[in-house]
Amino acid sequence: MERIIGIDLGTTNSCVAIVEGGTPVVLANKGGYKTTPSVVAISENGKRLVGHIAKRQAVTNAANTVYAAKRLMGRRWDSPAVRTMIETVPYTIVKGQGEDCRIKLRDRIYSVPEISSIILQEMRLVAEEYTGEKIEKAVITVPAYFNDSQRQATKDAGRIAGLDVVRIINEPTAAALAYGYGREVDKTVAVYDLGGGTFDISILRIADGVFEVLATAGDTFLGGEDFDGRIIMDWLVLEFARENQIDLRKDKMALQRLRDAAEKAKCELSTAREAEINLPFIISTGGADALHLQKTLTREKLEELTVDLVERTIKICKKTVEEAGEPVDEVLLVGGMTRMPLVQRRVREFFGRQPGKNVHPDEVVALGAAIQGSALMQDQQQVLLLDVTPMSLGIMIVGGLFSILIHANTTVPTSKSHIFTTVRDNQTSVKILVLQGEHEQASKNDLLGEFILTGLRAAPAGEVEIEVAFDINADGIVSVSARDLETGQEQAITVTATSGLSEDEIKKMMAENQEYLVDVRTNEALERKRLDARRAYAEVERIFPRVRDLLAGSDFGDDAIRKAEGVLSRAKKAIDGTDMEALQTASEALGRTLNMFKGVVEKIG
Amino acid sequence: MSEEEFSKLGAWEDRPRRNPTADLTAVQLDSRRAFLFTRLDGVASISDICAISGMTERDALKALASLVEVGLVQITPATGRRTAIAVLAPVAPVAPAAEPDGVGDEDDEEDELPSGPAEPAPVMERVDFLPDFNGVDRADVHWLRSKGDLGHVPGIPWQRLGAERYGRFEFDRRALLRHCDLTVAQRREVLFLDANAGQLDHFEYFNMEPTADRTEWRRAYFRFSRQFHPDTFFRKDTGEFGPLIEAIYRRGTRIHDAFSADQELRIATCGPWRPATPRTGRRWRRPGSGSSRRSGPSRSGARPSASRIASGWRPAARALRERLASNVRARREVHNPANERVERAQRFYEDGMQQYRDEKFIEAAASLQLAMTYDPRNEAYRQAHEKVSERAHAIKADQLWKFGYMQESVARIDEAIDSYLEAVKLSPRPNYCVHVAELMLSMDRDLHRAAELARIASDADPRNVEYLLLLGKIYERVGLAVKAAAVLERAQKLAPKDERIKKAQKGLKR
């Protein structure tokens, strides 16, 4: 049976899992870590670096190291989130063709899905390494509050990485799946997911293996990165500027060091009361002089800096709990940020209960994704997920207002229709703008698509009636149709959210990636062969002196020894080179020589 | 209590409903009347109300009548067949003479009731189908809640559930045998739901009892999802069932949303939820679970709402549920196509009566005719139609007659005769008949018809010699000598000295 992996594509860390014999397991990468930093870098010699390696070299290569790319996913160039990102990150964000944003690394411009695809690719390789088979299908998680274009961008990223994205599911939902999988649960569960870049709260009803999402909400621009940002911008940089009259933000390398130090201090403060931030030679003041940064961050200070962020999450929680309208039996904490004592305390206070400890905040999401993947493949499904639309859908009406047809938290698949009338006399056409969001003004919401219905009867305002119908299918794909009730004329679109990438671009990227993958795979094969050859070489070298002694004097011995010496020198050359075939023949020759040598030793020695 | 009291209530089929403008606080209701009052939803008929009241018919009617008297309840006359309320006299012996006016009243009543609908009944209120939850009035919900325990009402017999679910539904054999991965049970359910989507209500759709509470309907919804969620068929070949399943599940989610959207229902069945106060940080439990925790007096002091839930809310919830169930029934009635016809008939009837009052008799007759076509069994419509059509025919006939007369005066005899004949057909008055018969005789047109008309006239007024004379003349002309002789003889007996008759008889003998 085909296997589906679950990938948690996080803002700061990513994770991959698979269901193995009915039990979901998280797969460790080559370094033995279960999570991989979502960092991509291009090194000086143009090499692609992903994960821990990329993160480690970030200080020296700040401008070409992308982190938190997920925060740019599916966002428009002119959105405030992107503005903030441009100001704070050391890499260069540029404007793409379709109003999307791109990232400039070295001399190439990458799209955001491309960057994410590199991470997905890495996760896929981890899974392939583990299973020893080719993996082609995946369930990828996104924050519950991602809108259509952000989801589409994630799907595109999967495609570029050569993965068939079977389903996009929400992170908190995945966490609940992992929590309720394989045990008898009949509870209402709240999942509080505060990750690196996003915050989500979902309330689910779990019974009989059915997971029904009651309500979900969140903030796609609120997460650990913002907590780090507070430490850096509001405290370290500010204090340093006050003391030394130097703005550290101007120096990319300093900023990167500050970022690492802040993250480290924040993590330490989850257990310790205070953390040292010690950055010698943070900046040079011209000449040989350099300034050092040495500070102590206390837990109180951190909480003071970030308390409003936590309150923001609690406010969202309150709204969602009201929306769900059911008492919560259990609270799950997901995401690295929930290790912060302040967050735990506030969540405990708000829900009036101790959050559940039996889920791993970093791994649970990937596990849930893997469970959903395997559930889809089963004949008799153990779990069934009933998801909702996170945001309201509707159209723009007169006065630039937003008229909602499908409200947020409506179970999908669903359909809904409403009748609208013309607003001007002799109006013969209407423009239907399909929007997503919660603001009552149409312009503040995301535009998903538009179309025009023409050929209406010229009549006084309000006389011609148009029925607008929305339809969401199980994959979350929205289609909208408008029908003139008088003439029966109809116009319809399937809203294909765009990630800013055209189909051609995606195809091109897929091809490029395929090449890269072939490269990586051959490299790996070469490496393996080289390793084999090297081992054989060492073995031959080890026995060689003894054989030489044994064969010395015999007439055929000299000939054999000369031959063996030839083989060894050729093998040495092949091992140093990159020619696959030479390596192959060399290692075969080495094998023969070794066999012969062994025979000689056994017979004579 | 005499029957007279009940006559105010109308017929068994009439529907009492609450007067929305009445001030509830102004009247004192005893428990019986209050109970009865809560049963009224504007849909149940008087007989239904009596059946569920748990009192004797007489008591129930009495309570109802007093409610009507104080203006809390209004009676909506039924549109269909109406059966007068007749209650057997109480067992206590009552001398026939004790109530002398009772008999007379009864007669009046008998006359009045069947011919009753002089007052047009209001058109039935429309109940919104989806997505609002069964159109339960918010005010009603609050009112019900404030009343606390209202007792239990026997459940409504249910048809489309369990083993009875498919009833006599005929499955398409070929569809059951189509190639796909669905089991036979699944196919049955799909075909059944697809074919009956219009008739099944929310509860039937999910295959659950009408009194299902939140937990139950959620379970039912989960069961339904397990059956029809698209994910269930992810790797399966659904064949031609695919689109059906999708449509069914879509409808299911909408029903589910309608249920979930009903905040009142949610609160009533679950209790309100608010986050625990940070100070106490006490674990908060749902009402219904962990009764031992709730019962402790010290705890109830800490959470006053818990005791409130325990005492009042849950029974109220039950009452609400029953109301919802009855609303479901009401909606089913409204959406019954037969009901739509009745409703339309009612509308035409009202139009007709209005036109009748405006003395537009011809239009009124047409409207009533339509009303009769839509609801042929309604006696009231038939009678009204008869009454109106008589008037209408007379008027029409007069018009035609006038027109004919005008034509005759300008010597367009054929047109005149046609017009006269039409008029006579609508309203066969003797003088009209004679006039047209004479004309036809003198102009020698269709004498058989003329003879017929003359006979009608003479049948209507057998002692009129003129008519008989005319009839005789016509018979003579068409050559029915024997008949003519008989007629003339009759005429002569009536007027033995009339010269014209003698002359005619002589002419006949020749």
Image (cartoon, coloured by chain):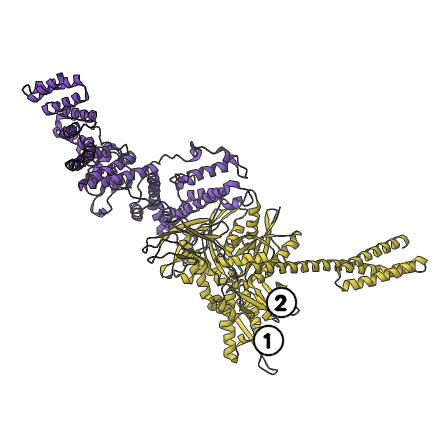
Chain colours: A yellow, B purple
Give the quarter of the figure containing the N terminus of chain B: top left
Pick the residue in front: A419 or A20: A419
Label 1, label 2: how many angstroms apart (C-alpha)?
27 Å
Q: Position of residue B45 (x, y in %)?
A: 27, 36
B273 versus A239 height, above or below: above
* SS class, disc 1: strand
Instruction: Mark 1 or mark 2: name the one nearer the start of the chain.
Output: 2
Give the quarter of the figure containing the C terminus of chain B: top left
* Residue A42 marker: 2
Quick one: label 2, few (<14), some, or many (20+) residues within 10 Å?
Answer: some
In the rendered image, which quarter is residue A319 located in?
A: bottom left
A541 versus B56 height, above or below: below
Q: Is residue A334 visible?
A: no
Which chain is home to disc 2? A
Task: Confirm or deny contact between disc 1 and disc 2 (CB under 8 A).
Answer: no
Horizontal arrangement in the rendering, residue B73 relative to residue B98 (left or right): right
* SS class, disc 2: strand
User: Type of residue at label 2?
Assistant: Ile
- The residue tagged 1 is A280
Q: Is residue A372 visible?
A: yes
User: Which residue is painted at 52% across and 57% down in the image?
Assistant: A152
Q: Residue furthest left?
A: B497
Pick the residue in front: B36 or A523: A523
How many circles with numbers are drawn on the protein? 2
Q: Position of residue A373 (x, y in %)?
A: 56, 50
